[in-house]
Amino acid sequence: MYEKMKLSWFSNLKGDTLAGIVVALALIPEAIAFSIIAGVDPKVGLYASFAICVIIAFTGGRSGMISGATGAMALLMVLLVKEHGLEYLLAATLLTGVLQIIAGYLRLAELMRFVSRSVVTGFVNALAILIFMAQLPELTDVTWHVYAMTLAGLAIIYGFPYVPVVGKSIPSPLICIVVLTAVYMLTGMEIRSVGDMGELPDSLPVFLWPDVPLNLETLMIIFPTALMLTVVGLLESMMTGTIIDDLTDTKSDKNRECKGQGLANIGSGLIGGMAGCAMIGQSVINIKSGGRRRMSSLIAGVVLLMMVVFLADWVSQIPMAALVAVMIMVAIGTFSWSSIRDLKKHPMSTNMVMVATVVVVVVTHNLAIGVFVGVLLAAMNFANKVGNILYIGSEEADEGSRRIYKVVGQVFFASSERFGSSFDFKETVEKVTIDLSRAHFWDITAVQTLDRVVIKFRREGTEVEMIGLNEASATIVDRFAVHDDPEAVEKLMGGH
């Protein structure tokens, strides 16, 4: 137990500490921006990021992953806040946490295995594009100083690792933020800083139970928003977990992550914070800055709160150009550049799934819709491919009085029409044998098609024999087939 805790928390203390500081600095403007999107005070997003970061460090299923207030969640809160106010948002946040804990116990994270690699790649690329697009307002209608500072920041980020001795030991994004902040303070140039984003809180958060009536009416108001927050939050967290798994070559416990996200959101709601989830941008910053263990998330949350409450005068001096440079680095590092090269090598169906996921996420800014479209397309492509792997051959037997049909492949809704049209019902034979020893029947559609085949042969006066059904297919056929029931046959074939 001690060794496991030591590995999870203290085996990478230096890397986690430095990475946590970088992440804390990157969290501040995003938390403020997402609060503004949701229509609430900046401290709602900052308190949320603090609470979620700290709690998920203890309860999450993926070390090294950063969670906090996110844009995807903020967009879902706008209508609730506008119509009912902050208190109802806090109540929805608490309900979101409860629903996420229930999802964890129901092991709904197992559904992630139905998300194909092309959907994950599309999700990653879409997020990279959204992260970059989110920086454009800071680079539009500004003076040349902003561009110069941003380029200088990128030069530091990509160049500092090559500096002898210290280049590999200190995260370059941290150096970028410190250097550009010093330049900004010394020169007094007129560019936007963190302080211009919104007022930073001047006190520690306190326990805050939502001031809403505890009745069915309140539940009906907050439930739709809480349900959407639950789905989007878990989806983004699970997808981010998969990406960090790949980056670190380690595995995560996604069901534990569901429960952890739920506990974190409950904690956030109880101190006046909004709902949040895993953040791919900050998670990538953490990993690339050397963060690997749970300590990095804990330090990020604690440092964030200490900075905005006790060091607000200094934090407000951080130029936005420095943080824009860091986020551009994240966007470049997050985007799967190999996926562009793979467009020539991968099948068109795979490329369509990836591109569709990217386009839908970028256009709608809704991760759930994009992933749903990608999964749906991938499922349709899979069904189409499997449906085409169906062969039905035939041969004469008993001197032309009997025909044997041999069925090879999967019979289900996508291949049932092809199965039904492969038999010659007008051929004059006494008996037809359908060999199903190398076939598998999957659903009701397949069974109904088999019924139609048998009934059509019998109406032509042909005796039908089915052989070789495997146990699973025989079970579904015996349960749902109706070709031996005269009344059901009439209904199936259009009678009354």
Image: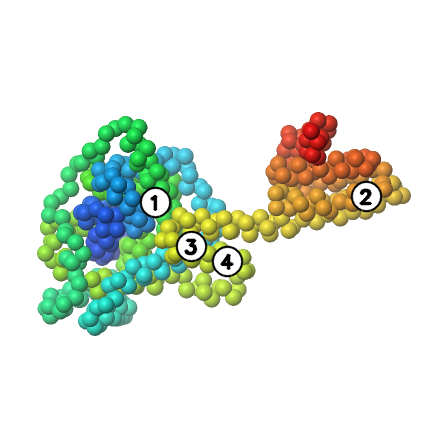
Left or right: residue 448 compared with residue 204:
right
Q: Calculate the distance from the C-alpha at mark 1 to the C-alpha at mark 2.
A: 58 Å
**Image depth: mark 1 or mark 3 in front:** 3
Task: Check disc 4 and report the residue beneath it.
Answer: 352
Tell me, yes or no, if residue 197 can be seen here.
yes
Looking at the rendered structure, which numbered label has been put on residue 426?
2
Extreme-right residue of the structure:
399
Q: Earlier in the sequence, mark 1 or mark 2?
A: 1
Disc sitting over residue 233 in the figure: 1
Q: Are marks 1 and 3 in contact (CB under 8 Å)?
A: no
Q: Mark 4–mark 3 contact, CB under 8 Å?
A: no
Q: Is residue 62 left or right of residue 393?
A: left
Measure the C-alpha gap from mark 2 to mark 4: 42 Å
CB within 8 Å, label 4 to label 1: no
* Amino acid residing under circle 3: Val
| SS state under label 1 | helix
Q: CA distance from mark 4 to mark 3?
A: 12 Å
User: Residue 486: where, in percent of width, then height?
Assistant: 73, 27
Task: Give the mark nearest the N terminus, 2 or 4.
Answer: 4
Comparing labels 2 and 4, the label whose residue is closer to the camera: 2
User: Picture coordinates of residue 302 (x, y %)?
Assistant: 19, 48
Residue tagged 3? 360
Q: Position of residue 468 (x, y in %)?
A: 72, 37
Q: Amino acid at mark 1?
A: Gly
Check whether the beta carbons of the residues at disc 2 and disc 4 lie within 8 A of each other: no
The mark that comes first in sequence, 1 or 3, is 1
**Residue type at tag 2:** Lys
